[in-house]
Amino acid sequence: MEYVTAHGARIPALGFGVFRMSDAEVEAVVPAALEAGFRHFDTAQIYKNEAALGRALDAAGAKRDELFLTTKVWVDKYAKGQFAASVDESLDKLGVDKVDLLLLHWPGDSVPVPEQVALINEVQAAGKTRFIGVSNQNVSQLRESARVSPAPIVTNQVELHPYIDQSRLAQAAQELGIAITAYYGMADGAVPKDEALQKIGAQYGKTAAQVALRWLVQQGYIALSKTARPARVAENFDIFDFTLSPADMQIIAGLSRPDGRIVDPKGLAPDWAA
């Protein structure tokens, strides 16, 4: 496993995400993920499967001190009292006394970013998370979060795959010492079917999916992989025994396009150009 370090947080560069997975799928696949080598697990309140993840990790005998657990607070909890109570509920479902990383899930358009940041800092000060971060923030929001937060913002979790150019955001994050965590790395199923990525993978004896994950990790990003099929878990983890050439990295970066963004919910997403 490779690691990404940001403001004292040492985060496994490859994580296992459980977005859009049922309780049954989570409980079936997590043992395979642990066996493959995954120790970084990413969930969220809105996924409705925190409890399933907690049960699966416990049933598999996972050692808490070997895990890096991330969850996210949903936008309807961005209020005094509600925020902390929702985190308590998440911890209870996960079966832990604190998570390793707590994120603000979306910036939304009703609660100012400084107020959100103040709430998550209160939770960290109360010892309920080791580190804090944000998700789906644009450049200006990320700069504002870093400026007003008493505790360091360690990551911004955003959509990132070969078809979207996030270089401007990545540059700002680097200047702030903030890690980028990539979700939707498979571009909702487009990556495994991509002929250019398949061709690159053939040179290394790897799949298109493995190439895309390696491309993310090789740039210093934290990549979240996901599969509900236990048989596919080992493939997702098997990306640390090869290095993409500079030419291949450039080819993959060249796949980005203006309409590459997939996730852009109204009322939750910011102005991405800001």
Image (cartoon, helix red, strand yellow):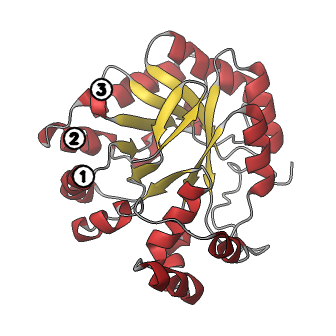
Q: Nearer the viewer, mark 1 or mark 3?
A: 1
Question: Badge 1 is on which residue?
Answer: 30
Q: Is residue 162 visible?
A: yes
10 Å neighbourhood of mark 3: few (<14), some, or many (≥20)?
Answer: some
Q: Which residue is rendered at x = 79% and y = 42% of the image?
A: 172
Question: Badge 2 is on which residue?
Answer: 57
Is 14 located above or below residue 71 in the figure? Answer: below
10 Å neighbourhood of mark 1: few (<14), some, or many (≥20)?
Answer: many
Q: Nearer the viewer, mark 3 or mark 2?
A: 2
Q: Is residue 270 visible?
A: no
Q: Does residue 35 appear to the left or right of 194 in the view shown?
A: left
**Residue 148 found in image quarter:** top right
Residue type, numbered disc 2: Leu
Q: Does residue 81 appear to the left or right of 141 in the view shown?
A: left
Q: Nearer the viewer, residue 237 or 80?
A: 237
Looking at the image, do the residues carrying marks 3 and 2 touch, with CB atoms under 8 Å apart?
A: no
Q: Residue furthest right?
A: 274
Q: Which residue is rendered at x = 48% and y = 47% of the image?
A: 13
Look at the numbered disc 1 and give the secondary structure of its residue: helix
First in sequence: mark 1 vs mark 3: 1
> How many marks can you see?
3
Q: Which residue is rendered at x = 32% and y = 49% of the image?
A: 38
**Residue 115 found in image quarter:** top right
Q: Nearer the viewer, residue 191 or 235?
A: 235
Q: In the image, residue 271 lies at what x, y percent? A: 82, 51
Q: Does residue 128 appear to the left or right of 116 in the view shown?
A: left
Residue type, numbered disc 3: Asp
Question: Badge 3 is on which residue?
Answer: 92
Q: In the image, residue 249 lies at what x, y percent? A: 65, 70
Looking at the image, do the residues carrying marks 1 and 2 touch, with CB atoms under 8 Å apart?
A: yes
**Residue 114 found in image quarter:** top right
